[in-house]
Amino acid sequence: MGIGSHQDKPIAPTAARLMRAATIVAMSAAVLMIAIKGAAYVTTNSVALLSSLADSALDLLASALNFFAVRHALTPADKEHRFGHGKAEPLSALGQSAFVAGSAVLIAAEAASRFRSPIVVEQGNVGLIVMVVATVITLALVTFQKFVVRKTGSTAIGADSLHYTGDVLMNLSVMAAIYASTALNFPLADPIFGAGIAIFLLINAVRIGYSAIGDLMDQEMPTADRDKIIAIVKTNPAVRNIHEMRTRTSGVQSFIQMHIVLDQSLTLMEAHRISDDVEDAVLAAYPGADVIIHQDPEGVAEVHRPVGAQLQ
């Protein structure tokens, strides 16, 4: 089978440094928030604040998992893993979804007990100040993580950013719960907001898990990306058609395979040159992608079995 050039393409050093930095910053932020929220919970006795504290503790575990997963994902391809170690990223994201779901269950249970036996929130001002500080820290972290995701496309850091974004909304809910419980003398506001936060976390867990499973199952790249690749390939006047295109992602690494139809009178060298031109055009739009191109002579019928089809 004639194919275009195919080689392992390591992740750019700048992208690797950004991904490592993002995991360290996330763990540091989680440790800081656990410390201040823990002190605030002891002072206020708020279940909404307890839910935020529990979530920060799970954030630390998830970010620590991310720390090791990203480092493993950045390991270059070897003889046993010729496609690299990028699957470590969606595996980490799947683990994060389990952490977030567990947090939601614990918070829901505590909120249910407070519905039966409401507890007065104390020192509400302390809780509000702490949550404002936590929100500022989380917003700064999410901003940095989104910057890293834009630059690298990291699945694991994207999942981390998603649940920290949820933390921003959670912090705002906790502040509303503390204010309603103290200033408005409505103690049930605390477990009500706690239950709402649990539902929100569970939705986030499903979103993270669904995305991770898609990557692990080699789901195709988004339709917009596939259409873009086809359009790029067809801009080469020597390409008569394109078919059998398959795409997938593995962490920050993209894999793109296709058959292009060329004039059957072309020499092997001419077909190879055209394939290289097509590959360069695709790589210009998707830097670092692993692109494999098979050349088909126009007018020659081919039978292709789907992946996994049994031989007759």
Image: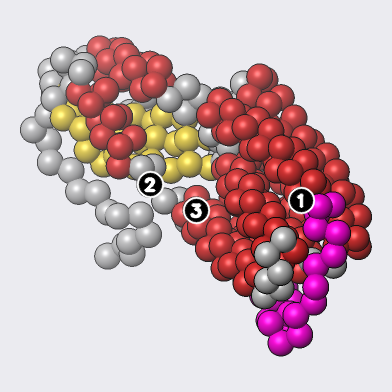
The residue that appears at 38% across and 47% down in the rendered structure is: 220
Q: Secondary structure at mark 2?
A: loop
The residue that appears at 47% across and 35% down in the rendered structure is: 254
User: Please, what is the three-letter code of the amino acid marked with disc 2?
Assistant: Glu
User: Please, what is the three-letter code of the amino acid marked with disc 1?
Assistant: Leu
Q: Give the x, y percent position of residue 107.
A: 70, 71
Mark 1 or 3 closer to N-term?
1
Provide the residue designation for mark 2: 220
Mark 3 or 2 closer to N-term?
3
Instruction: Give the label on residue 260, or none.
Output: none
Q: Residues within 10 Å of mark 3 (few under 14, many from 20)?
A: some
Q: Which of these two is toward me, 32 or 299? A: 32
The residue that appears at 68% across and 26% down in the rendered structure is: 18
Q: Give the x, y percent position of residue 302.
A: 18, 43
Provide the residue designation for mark 3: 211
Q: Which of these two is toward me, 78 or 139? A: 139
